[in-house]
Image (cartoon, rainbow, N blue to C red):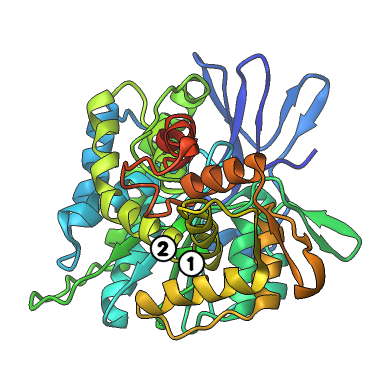
Amino acid sequence: METGGEIFATGVMFELVRDAANDEVKLIRSDGRNILTSARFDENGRVFVPPMLDGDLVKAFVLPSGLADYGSTASLFDDLRRLFREHPGLSEECISKAAFCALATWFPEYTAPLVLVSAPDASGSQLLLDQLRCACRRSIYVSDITSAGLWSLPLWLHPTVIMDQPRFTKELLRVVRAMSCPSARVPRKGRLLDVYCPIVLRTEDPISDSWVIQNSIQIEIMPTSARLPRILPQVLREISRELQAKLLSYRLSNFVKLQHSGFDAPQLAFPTREIARALGDCIVDDHELQSRIIPLLAEQDEDTRIRRTTTFEAVVVEAGLLFCHEKTKRESAYVGEFATVSNAILEGRGEQIELEPRAVGDILRSVGLFTCRLGHAGRGVLLLSQVRKKIHELACRFGVRSIDDGVDRCEFCAESRARFGDSTLTGA
């Protein structure tokens, strides 16, 4: 049975390693006490062997050649930081982000981080991509690739795919979304492909897609007058050899512990909270190091909150909230009225987009506010008590500003804020 790694209920684990003597890919077997390396293992009545891959493809993957003592979690993290500190264009915050992300790629069963690299010049990003390739698990570097080309790779090995793409296209967005969903499978030639993988993405185009921005860890390379260091390929290989051995040892020693991690960041909004939890779960036996993750993501979290309140869904819900708070209690609101108020909110925030009533009707249905015919004047929403309550709950979920200010304007404001305000805004 070909395998890229196995985890048995007995605690036995198989991992891929590269024999430094003959460049052959083998399996390493760990039971928590003993370590064995071989081209085949008999386990539970089956024979396991490494995957039979094309020679050039095998060489493209970065694989450890053995194990090494990593000391402690903090010591290993410092090793990673020292690697990324060689880049003069990285701030201390981005050095730590890169270290946390690299460590997380070693546990794709729990998380597959999406790392977005932005740089003013290609040379600065190239150095960082080379450094990430040294530190990430089973990294493979691809450039200007199509979805068909990517699906042809053995992504079932859950490698870290480092993509250097000049342009961020709709096709690339579909690829990134598919590879970031742990339960999704891509149909290809009569098969369902498991494509869930850690991703490092570098493009020349500024990315405006809100999903990518909110679900990625963003690392910015700043312009610098310092000369970029020239790290020779053999030096990079030696750095990689040392780091990969320590990181593999960390994975084998701590895989089970990650199942019991209770790290959380309730002060962050979804999906930033999920990113923080995923990174924190991969840090074992070091609460102080885990606590550094939250401030690293604080600015990204604030941006996520602002973006959420300016979505069309949030604006339409905010319009509904205004109807709920009118002094003269109204019984209903037409879709056209929702559109008028929504457009006034958008205009007041400097937006040039205008929503048509038909689009507003679609948005209302998408958030669970269903319309009905209100006489000859058209369709609208009946503002029954249950509907008003739901509008307030949606306002909390979207972080609508007029309910996030702490002022109780009706009977549902305090109730919804108490029930949903602290949890839904933070993504619970």
Q: Local crowd at mark 2 within 10 Å, few (<14), some, or many (≥20)?
A: some
Q: Nearer the viewer, residue 195 or 412?
A: 412
Q: The N terminus lies in which quarter of the figure?
A: top right
In the rendered image of this protein, does residue 44 appear above or below residue 241?
above
Residue on which the image places disc 1: 210
| Whether residue 153 can be seen here | yes
Seen at 44% across and 86% down, the residue is 352
Is 180 displayed left or right of 92 in the figure?
right
Q: Nearer the viewer, residue 195 or 367?
A: 367
Secondary structure type for disc 2: helix
Is 295 displayed left or right of 423 in the figure?
left
Q: Identify which amino acid the numbered label 2 is placed on.
A: Arg
| Residue 315 locus on image (x, y percent) | 49, 64
State the image quarter where residue 49 is shown: top right
Looking at the image, is mark 2 or mark 1 earlier in the sequence? Answer: 1
Whether label 2 touches label 1, CB < 8 Å: yes
Q: Nearer the viewer, residue 15 or 317?
A: 317
| Residue 245 locus on image (x, y percent) | 39, 39
| Whether residue 282 can be seen here | no
| Residue 347 locus on image (x, y percent) | 40, 79
Disc number placed over residue 307 in the picture, else none: 2
- In this rendering, the label closer to the viewer, 2 or 1: 2
Q: Local crowd at mark 1 within 10 Å, few (<14), some, or many (≥20)?
A: few
Seen at 33% across and 72% down, the residue is 118
**CA gap, disc 2 and disc 1:** 8 Å
Q: Identify which amino acid the numbered label 1 is placed on.
A: Ser
In the rendered image of this protein, does residue 84 appear above or below residue 397?
below
